[in-house]
Amino acid sequence: MRRRWLDPYTDIIFTDSSDLDIDHLVPLHWAWMHGAWAWAWSDTVRSDFANDSRNLFAVDDGTNREKGAKGLLEWLPPSGDFACQYASRFWLVVLIYGLVVEEPEAKAMQQQRAILCGSG
């Protein structure tokens, strides 16, 4: 039986792993710029963040490269069906790791999530 991966960002099923990247939903650089550097995360916390399954997805390599280190306000997955979960998970990871999001950005992220999830 062939292995199959569903890319939630594009809603495409892949059968060749070479077409996929593992994406950090909250990018490592974005996290660094939002407080990870300031808290001087220990090696354990950095490793936990980098390997947290809530923050990792197998996705189309081209889509992942297009996303790069963009945050929630700069990029959304092409599949609208996943947008609510993407925004919700992004915010969850931010909260779990205590990343710093200034009030205007936090408000914009929460408004975007409300709109994407149909409650705004």
Image: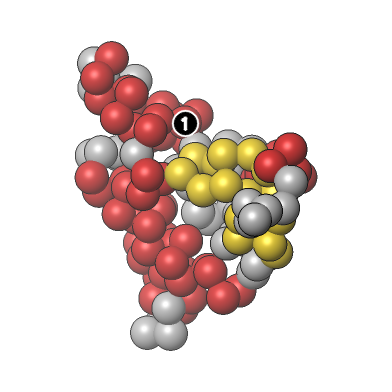
Horizontal side of residue 14 vs 53, given as left or right: right
Residue 87, given in percent of the width and then of the height, sits at 44, 62
User: Which residue shows up at 70% across the image and 64% down it?
Assistant: 12
Q: Is residue 92 visible?
A: yes
Residue 59, given in percent of the width and then of the height, sits at 63, 49
Horizontal side of residue 61 vs 103, given as left or right: right
Figure quadrant of the N terminus? bottom right
Instruction: Judge by depth and name the residue closer to the eye, 84 or 120.
Output: 84
User: Which residue shows up at 30% across the image and 54% down it?
Assistant: 92
Residue that carries the numbered disc 1 in the rendered image: 28
Give the secondary structure at mark 1.
helix
Looking at the rendered structure, the kind of residue marked 1 is Leu
User: Which residue shows up at 38% across the image and 57% down it?
Assistant: 89
Figure quadrant of the C terminus? bottom left
Binning the other alpha carbons within 10 Å of mark 1 as few (below 14), some (14 to 19) or many (20 upward) gives some
Please say if 68 is above or below 72.
above
Q: Is residue 10 visible?
A: no
Q: Quadrant of residue 46?
A: top left
Please say if 6 is above or below 95.
below
Horizontal side of residue 52 vs 22, given as left or right: left
User: Which residue shows up at 43% across the image and 67% down it?
Assistant: 85
Residue 105, given in percent of the width and then of the height, sits at 41, 53
- Check the image and name the residue furthest to the front: 1
Residue 62, given in percent of the width and then of the height, sits at 76, 45
Q: Quadrant of residue 61?
A: top right
- Report the coloring of the rendering: secondary structure
